[in-house]
Amino acid sequence: MKATGAVSFWQATLAVLWKDLAAEWRSRELLSAMLVFALLVIFIFNFALELQTQLRASLSAGVLWVTLTFAGTLGLNRSLAVEKDRGCLDGLLLAPVDRAAIYAGKALANWVFMLIVAAIMLPLFGLFYNASLILPGVVLVVLLGSEGYVAVGTLLASMAVQARTRDILLPILLFPVVIPVVVAAVKATGGYLQTLPLEEIRPWLNLLGVYDVIFTSVAFMVFDSILEE
Amino acid sequence: MVLIEVRHLTKRYGPKVVLRGLDLRVEEGEFVALLGPNGAGKTTLLRILASLSKPTLGEVWIAGYRLRDQAAWVRQRLGVVSHQPLLYGDLSAEENLRFYARLYGLRNAETRIREVLTLVGLWARRRDLVRTFSRGMQQRLAIGRAILHDPEVLLLDEPHTGLDQEACDMLDHLLRQVATRGRTVVMTSHDLARAADLASRFDVLSGGCIQASARREDLAGDALLTFYRQALGPQNAASVSKEVFP
Ligand SMILES: Nc1ncnc2c1ncn2[C@@H]1O[C@H](COP(=O)(O)OP(=O)(O)OP(=O)(O)O)[C@@H](O)[C@H]1O
Ligand SMILES: [Mg+2]
């Protein structure tokens, strides 16, 4: 036997992550869809809310997270549709690895995509909304918020992809569950932009952290069972 | 040694019973052709053996491991060719195999990938994206993917679909090699002539269980067709000749 039978959790996770990044590097389908969408949302809000500079700055936290949330579902749907449509999900499930590692690899890849979108959006926001979003605090909130979002999103996208109506199903399943993340992220981002004292922001950061830990753990535990036929 | 043992396997999709109390034993080194009409449940059975689908009732053991709770051990020993190629269109042939080699923890992956790509006749196209491959080329690569880790058990669901004559011969040659090395194969097929050529045993799945089973030694000449017809019973037998000679 050439196979060793002992692929560690991290080896499997990295293999899946590498595969997703390599495939995306080729096609750039997922990122370009997310980015175009995000840009359009920023544009539309910019014209729809013809506000004074002052107000804009305070609204940008909300606009940022609405954009990330919606762009995120595009990426999540795509990421799992690629696996499902060509039967690759079966290929992954046939592998002698912990299925949680497959989840971890997919979720990490989706996180990377979200962060790339965020990294492009933050400077653009400065342009449109007259608010510099590139603050260490905001970056922290983006990291925490997108982690929770992607942890739940990858799980629910794996569920939704089994259904015929997956494109509609994912937002319906996902948005109610991520409300705490979005609310906390908007509050925390807003707090940093208005340079509130840390004591006022900390509860929201705590909420994000707790949400991330709980939902990531739950996703690890249930991922295997939601894929069973 | 019994390599695959299935006991009282039942699979239901909603109210529809696809497999009802199916029993199956496959010895190490056997090459079983799983025959049966469309919709008989051949794919369903293979998917359950491959741990891709859960039985409603019943137990499956493969290589001594119980599928229900030792699936990872079983998966290490399985190679599967299914209706779909299980390949990523945005990766090249080589990258697809490299990815699976990592998931199976293969040592000497590069040597093995080269070996397999040469075997299925895709070495020259190894750098091309699978998306640009024809159906038959994808099927060739799917076969390469299945044998990459040199599995003890091969589960093949109509592996000849989409292959040209040359590729069919390549696959047959490869399967004979695999069989002579003592590997165990379960293959579904609608091509009785080809199945007769390759398999050492013929099982007919119909009505949710194995209706009949015959060894190659016991069937001479075109006896397989007669055997298959008898196993299906008079109501289904009419469709058989059409299936064999489409
Ligand atoms: N996911 C599913 N949901 C509901 N019914 C299913 C599902 N998968 C298979 N079936 C049903 O199970 C039965 C057996 O299907 P299966 O694909 O196993 O047949 P098969 O023997 O492989 O046929 P073929 O020769 O056409 O490949 C069919 O009646 C099919 O409709
Ligand atoms: Mg079938």
Image (spheres, coloured by chain):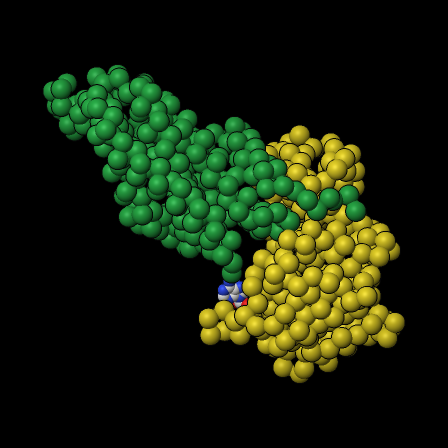
Chain colours: A green, B yellow
Q: Residue B234: image x %, image y %?
A: 66, 83
Q: Nearer the viewer, residue B94 or A204?
A: A204
Residue A111 appears in which quarter of the rendering?
A: top left
Is A114 displayed left or right of B225 in the figure? left
Q: Residue A147: image x %, image y %?
A: 40, 36
Residue sitting farthest toward the front: A199
Residue sitting farthest toward the left: A52
Identity of the residue drawn at 61% across and 54% down: B83
Identity of the residue drawn at 43% across and 44% down: A216
Q: Nearer the viewer, residue A58 or B190?
A: A58
Q: Residue A222: image x %, image y %?
A: 46, 53
Residue sitting farthest toward the bottom: B234
Is B147 displayed left or right of B138 in the figure? right
Q: Quadrant of the N terminus of chain B?
A: bottom right
Identity of the residue drawn at 20% across and 24% down: A196
Q: Quadrant of the C terminus of chain B?
A: bottom right
Whether B150 is drawn above or below A197: the answer is below
Identity of the residue drawn at 28% across and 42% down: A180
Whether A45 is drawn above or below B162: the answer is above
Q: Can residue B141 be seen at all in this image of the molecule?
A: no
